[in-house]
Image: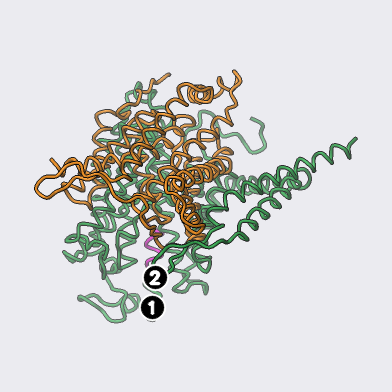
Amino acid sequence: MSTNTQKTDVVATLKEAGLSGLIAGALALPLAGFKTFSLNGVLTAETRFDWVIMAAVIVAVGRFLLSMGQNSFLPSLSSGISGAATSVGHAINKNNKILLVLLLAAVIIFPFSPMANRHSLDLAVYVLIYVMLGWGLNIVVGLAGLLDLGYVAFYAVGAYSYALLATTYDLSFWICLPMAGIFAASFGIVLGFPVLRLRGDYLAIVTLGFGEIIRVILLNWYDLTGGPDGISSIPKPTFFGMAVFSKIGKDGLPPFHELVGIEYSSLNKFVFFYFLIMALALITNFFTLRIRKLPIGRAWEALREDETACRSLGINPTNTKLSAFAIGAMFAGFAGSFFATRQGFISPESFTFIESAIILAIVVLGGMGSQVGVILASLVLVLGPELVRELAEFRMLAFGGVMVLIMVWKPKGLLSRREPTIRLHAKPEAGEVK
Amino acid sequence: MEYFTQQLINGVTLGSIYGLIAIGYTMVYGIIGMINFAHGEIYMIGAFVAMITFLVLNMLGGIWLPFALIIALIMSMVFTSIWGWTVERIAYRPLRGSFRLAPLISAIGMSIFLQNLVQVLQGARVKPLQPMIKGGFEIMEHDGFTVTISYLQIFIIILTIVLMTVFTLIINKTSLGRAQRATEQDRTMASLIGVNVDRTISLTFVMGAALAAVAGLMVTLYYGVIDFYIGFLAGMKAFTAAVLGGIGSLPGAMLGGLLIGLIEAFWSGYFTIEYKDVAVFSILVLVLIFRPTGLLGKPEIEKV
């Protein structure tokens, strides 16, 4: 009897696998089965059916193994994996403070460790920019619940305002940084004012459109922005107006290594960048943590949960949303001006929709509203692709695939547990059944 | 006046293409409330399938043009539908019932994936195709400026009208359409009265993909060049069209598509071509300020 059911099981699995293989073949037939190329200016195609057969076989076999595994070892394996992930998550949540201190210590020591070189510091700075952007967008999406698909627009505003102010008026980075934030925030207000009355998904498309508008304007306003050529030779920041990071002094400022009395190293500048973006990111994070305790932060979260209830309690939804939008934009502006000074060159190419999508994905994949989750997701989505540069064009393919897989695997994000803002009762002790 | 008429014709043609894509967005949004970000990529795949079909037919030797068109139409609709179905099955169905942003991120991931898949498989270069439907009618002439409507434009407009009619009939008259409308109103209730909700949603994706495939075929013929990146901008415009018309409403999507096409044609005709996208989005914002649910959208009733 049992062998009988087993047999039908195998037959059913085989059938299913065959079907998936067929579908994969059908998917691959037009796109992989024919290779199109230009021959003397005329487009022609040649067949490549081996690819189709390969795709079908791989999918069929994969599906078969998966279903067979599902009946035997996979459930225990997957529950093991997700169990491990959950317990890691629990451990992270439980030992929050200790872990954070350890992490912070590691992050601070990193530039002085032997691991630090130009390349690794550059990568670290790159990841930290996204961490900061993630934390900034988290204010808008995670706290206020506004779906912003054009966050990169504010990042662009920040970058261009620093680049323009610094190259035209010769202003220092430290004056431009707050100004870039203010500019970005004003853009947020100007955009937000008419559209924040709209509900969720309408807001999404308008912000998406706004992101495109900014990019198109940057691309076409040649006199101001340099169009597709962008702006180059953007000045580097000074050491708080006291020293410069070159071998010899400039503009009456002494070189940094002489000021602090250390040996000259070209690495100094990168270490400074590293700490600068870390400070900016931590400010963003700290701001978010604190503002959740203030009336305005609570109003954001209340608004996210129930707009009607907020209205009846006397919270003005438009103003509340506007403040979240503007503050989120301000942090993007800071990040943008940092980006401009680090790169030394900016062009509209750096501010495409894909950037907005990556930042949003960082927030959501990390687990909405989870600050540590943002770090984790930045490592996966930003550091990951950088580490596998050799894959070239397969890199973005894998990027998209990983995004889908993580979402399907953990729809609530990698670290989905969030500490509630307010507890009506005392926190239950560990182990206590609630 | 002649110039105006010419831009009108161009705008209606363009609007037909946007309208067909917009229906896919609006139906999916109506039925499961998610923005199907990968829909633009489905349209791009439709364009590639159509192009490859034409190339293969060419290799097999000259086939009578209307026949070739019908074959390409069927091929791209069938294969693109399978893509649409698979995308829903893999990336969206497991996420049904989870919170609102999860399927959106999954859709963005899918969009990046499909774009790069086509780039890897077919190369990053633009694909130019020889024009196949040539010639047209001269309907007006004045001071040396002739207004022409090409056969291709007539083909696009008529095909769009036919498809939209068929489509409206499917939604309004058939049992499938009834199931779709029921699922849209209340998924749980629909499943209780015997509607196969999963199948209905899958079919919605298939229908949306089929229409996007037709739009892809049209674009292949109309512009003659495609590349793996066309899905992004077209998808964004079509989504804008769906929102402009009132998302969830089928006539709204058609109207929105038409309007977007007209705005684009007239803006590039009378003002600057560089800023046509800016014009489209600015008008969207204006419309939404005065009619927050879009032109034909029903105001949402908030239940407390």
Task: Determine the secondary structure under disc 1.
Answer: loop
Assign the C terminus of chain A to one quadrant of the image.
top right
For image coordinates 51% across by 50% down, the residue present is A372
User: Type of residue at label 1?
Assistant: Ser
Relative vertical location of residue A72 with respect to residue A343 in this rendering, above or below: above
Task: Determine the secondary structure under disc 2.
Answer: helix
Q: Is residue A97 left or right of residue B145?
A: right
Toward the viewer: B21 or B57? Answer: B57
Mark identifier at residue A417 = none
| Residue B123 position within the rendered picture, expressed as x and y whole percent measured from the top left | 46, 62
Rendered colour, chain A:
green
Rendered colour, chain B:
orange
Q: Does the segment drawn in magenta span residue A242?
A: no
Quarter of the figure with residue A314: top left
Count of picture labels: 2
What is the distance, in whole Å, between disc 2 and disc 1 at their CAs?
8 Å
Assign the N terminus of chain A to one quadrant of the image.
top right
| Residue B301 position within the rendered picture, expressed as x and y whole percent measured from the top left | 38, 20
Mark identifier at residue A266 = 1
For image coordinates 11% across by 45% down, the residue present is B142
Q: Is residue A90 left or right of residue A232?
A: right
Toward the viewer: A194 or B289? Answer: B289
Relative vertical location of residue A433 with respect to residue A99 in this rendering, above or below: above
| Residue B100 position within the rendered picture, expressed as x and y whole percent measured from the top left | 48, 36
Residue on which disc 2 sits:
A270
For image coordinates 38% across by 74% down, the residue present is A268
Instruction: Mark yes or no: residue A395 visible.
Output: no
| Residue B189 position within the rendered picture, expressed as x and y whole percent measured from the top left | 56, 19
The answer for which chain carries disc 1 is A
User: Type of residue at label 2?
Assistant: Phe
- What residue range appears in magenta? A272-280
